[in-house]
Amino acid sequence: MKIKCLSLVLALPMLLWQCGGEATTPVAGDCDLNQPVAGDWVRVWQPADPDNLNPFTHTHAQAGYINENIYQGLFSPDPVSLQPLPVLAAKPLEISPDGLIFTCEVRPEAKWADGSPVTGHDFAFTMKAIFNPECNSAPYRGAYDFIQDVVVDSANPRRFQVVAKFPFFRAEAIVSYIEFMPRYLLDPNNYLGPYTVAQMNTEVGSKEETALRNMPGIREFATLFNSPEYGRDPKFISGSGPYALESWTPNQQIVVVRKTGWWGDELAKTNPQFGAWPSKIIFKTIPDRSTAFTSMKGEEIDVMRDILPKDFAEATKTDPASLKYNLFTPDAYNFTCIMINNRPNQSRAKALGELNVRKALAHLVDVKGLIDNVYYGYGKPAVSPVSPLRGPIEFNDTLKMVPFDQAKATALLSAAGWTDTDGDHVLDKMIGGKKEKLEFEFLVSDGSTTGQAVALHFKENCQKAGIVINIKAMQFSLITEKTGKHDFDLAGLNMVSGHLPTDLYQYWHSDSYINGGSNSMGFVNAEADALIEQIRREPDANKRKPMYWRVQEIIAEQQPVIYMLVPQERVAINKRFATAKANSVRPNYQALSFWACPSVQKFK
Amino acid sequence: MGLYLLKRILIFIPTLFLITLLSFIISINSPGDPVERLLSGGDDNAGTADRKVTEAVYLAKRKQLGLDLPVFYFSLCSYAETDTLHRVARPHERAMLSRLTRDYGNWEQIQDYFRCATRLEHEAFRIVPDSAQRMIITEIKVAVSELKRTGVKAEVLSHLHRIDSLCRLRPALLAPVRQLTNECAAAFAHIEATATPWKNYIPSFHIYGTQCQYHRWVSGIIRGDFGISYQLSRPVVTALKEAIPWSLTINIIAVIVSYCISVPLGIYSVRNRNTGRERAVTTLLFVLYSLPGFWVATLLITFLCNPEYLHLFPAAGGMDDAHSDAWSWGMRMADYAKHLFLPTLCYTYTAFAFLSRQMRAGMMEVINMDFIRTARAKGLSERTVIWKHALRNSLIPLITHFAGIFPMMVGGSVIIETIFAIPGMGRLSVEAIFSQDHPMIIAIFTLGATLTMVGVLVSDLLYAIVDPRISYSRK
């Protein structure tokens, strides 16, 4: 009797599930693949909810992926060629010969959700909101700091000029891609109206900034702008893009819905770039990647990126015809490396300050073996901090990978005076009258199985060469904090770069070491500093080429990090979106361009 | 009984106070700087590569979160320590000052040295190098920044020496820097000369009054405001309100089912003790009890949510994509049931395996007691003996376990909620801990502690109900 009851309990949800309807098997469908059809939903995987969706206060990359569908800039980069494609822009940017004035014009068709036109005043408002010292947009201010003023044409408010303080190599790209925020919606009381952009862009910590904080309207606007409503409420998350935020169920899903009568609909008939086909895009939060991939197999989600290498490798071994999704492996813009503390203090391993020791360590990493065994082949050896995808102007393709060579490592170490004097199989050397052993601590994230596998492999190779590596697994945020304080020997690092021209300042300029920036390695080189600054001031890409190449050479000579690999992104897209492709620019897909033939659409 | 209840509830107040205090102190002292964390954001595609968190931005954010205030109403520290250290913003500078204080114990002189080093920093950073001097200036800046990070004598002296020798290479340009370097060296020598390390062994008491972080936080709680979550940038209470129903639903079902199964199963074991069937049940329970939840959850997802095997349930989430309030009540409930079945199963099986074993052990102990033998001797049926006499007396261990149910109900399970992507309290807690979201962590701690107290009280009252020998009334 009890067993019967139990089976009834088990069977009940199964019956309920059956009531829910059976999933259709996806096929590409039988329609013309050159004629996109609107409709259907795209369900996109995300590992965690973003903190908020305000374009200039959020701190999660995920928010940017969602906002792509809601907000627009003058241009958007073509995901493959990276060439700017006009979105809000009526024509290409006009740039003054000195590279200081950018003249822009917004399309007459472009409208906000309430039907009012998008103008230069909205651009100026966006800049003012970012520069407002009371707004939580501090992490963004640095990137836009070069903007001195925005001047809107009084006769034609769609036309405006952006004036730069100094020539800046990323200026054109940044002006092109800044997302416009609607002034009518976010500043209904016109708190920022009385100010110019020039007045708002004060130097951080200056007297002008303090004065500005106390000016009327500045705090009042910031209180609104920083409020949870401006970051989460569908009423305030509204841009000129084809989608509007419909709902946000915390830690479950964020739904954006296609606007009816969107201004770009007419343009989409002739220009596929304006195509926005799904009636809904749902961002589903599933923290566990294995569960997410099972959901992908079960067609509970339609797009997934960053699939575990092991799961992805298994899927590729399956007959593609039996899979319900297509697999893609575009090259990534980021690269992984082992970061070395180049300027160790008293409490840290001083040996890492020696070039020979750093070079020897690099010879002890079997990058190819790691790619094959730990990353299941999804990666290529990295040789430089610049992505090969950036092309020959930026990427120095003459650099060679440091080969895995234990004999070379031993030779380098003995040349530097490291020998095993006491027969304990660990190299040592007298430094300042004290015998130092070659022993390092390697910080790895406790959540990263690949990171830990790399560390173990490295430890084994080092052991053979007489170097002791103590692996310390800890929470990722603690590693960031420890490396930020230079309290580490070695640590795994994933450097991410976007589609903008590579800025080496963040990781490789001495200022970024001095002021506690991302140069945790302590890479200090005056020549590299000068070149990095020149690159930033040089608007002509061709003139930047030799500088980029030289900086990469210096970095390779100094071995401040051990390069590992440029991973390949691992993306799966449901087969009913037959024309959908993955690309290198994160999030690696453009969900709004997905469409399915009516016969295979899952949601009407 | 009423008086007892009142007393217990009154004891709640100081206990709660202590709990909030403890959770606050633990949370505040956890490693990591929430301000750095909050400010290190941005989107790489948006071109925010330059994420330099400038001093002023850092200070403003710190002030906004109230982290510039002293931690508590008073502090008890050593005589050497200053009560103004919390005003120094940068953690590495605080660490450097603490180190110097610990070694030398003369705050006045340490402060002089710190001011001098700060002036040196400003002076060194004021110089705009031309290409010829770039190398020297860069090296000076690096050495000065390293100087401000260290409180170790050997390092301080070596950095000062290095700056001094670098200044000699461009004596005219770097005269002010050299001057300040010498002043710093003198200030440091003064620290050493006037060192009073014994002050570290003398206790000292400081009162800050209500201008402290704890007061700010606790007065918020009294108003029912747990603050704004750092990580979610929204009120903690709202986030809790959204997460609690998920964990609560799963747990209530799991508790009811596990009690409904474990009590009869325990009795069944006792009635059939020493038979093959009983041994089989006991072995099964033991096996179930030993299976780790995360493993079972992964197996269930792999085999029951996967078209490669059986696709009976959705793998993740609490509801369907199309779920809407427009659906009928029945449809919505069916949708929840379909999504929550496997997570609930995972919760339930460990609980009932444990409870059944408890129940069996309790029953076994009672069944051999004299009063049971008496009951049987009176000629009562086995059914009455077990259900009326033995059961009531063997419930004590289950009631003890019941005390833990209250916090568990809202606590959720980190692992199961993460694997099944259920947006409950377990996930909220672990995400808060990983992102050092102090307001959220403290709120969850306090809630858990309050419910534990309520649970203990309820089980104490239940003891008195099931066992007449236990009484809280004054005789």
Image: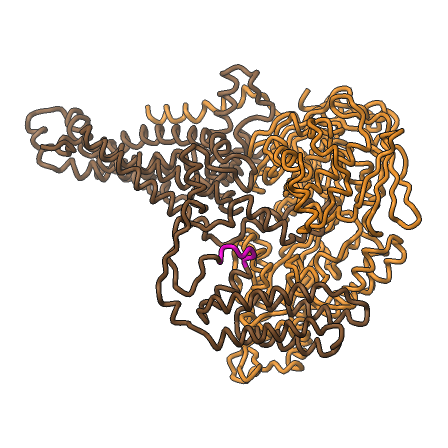
Q: Tell me the residue at 63%/54% (across/down).
A: B55
Q: How many marks?
A: 0
Q: Tell me, what hue is chain B? A: brown
Is any part of residue A600 visible from this angle?
no
Q: Is residue B90 magenta?
A: yes
Which residue is drawn at the image coordinates 56% and 59% (left, top)?
Answer: A482
Residue B345 shown left or right of residue A550 in the figure: left
Seen from the viewer's position, the closer of residues A224 and A171 is A224
Residue in the picture at 76% in, 64% down:
B128
Q: In the image, A443: left or right of A26?
A: left
Q: Colour of chain A?
A: orange
Q: Residue A24 at what x, y percent from top left? A: 65, 25
The C terminus of chain B lies in quadrant:
top left
Q: Position of residue A389 (x, y in %)?
A: 80, 51
- Name the one closer to the observer, B285 or B338: B338
- Answer above or below: position of A119 versus B83: above
Which stretch appears magenta? B85-91
- The image quarter containing residue B118 is bottom right
Q: Position of residue B417 (x, y in %)?
A: 48, 37
Q: How is the image coloured?
A: by chain
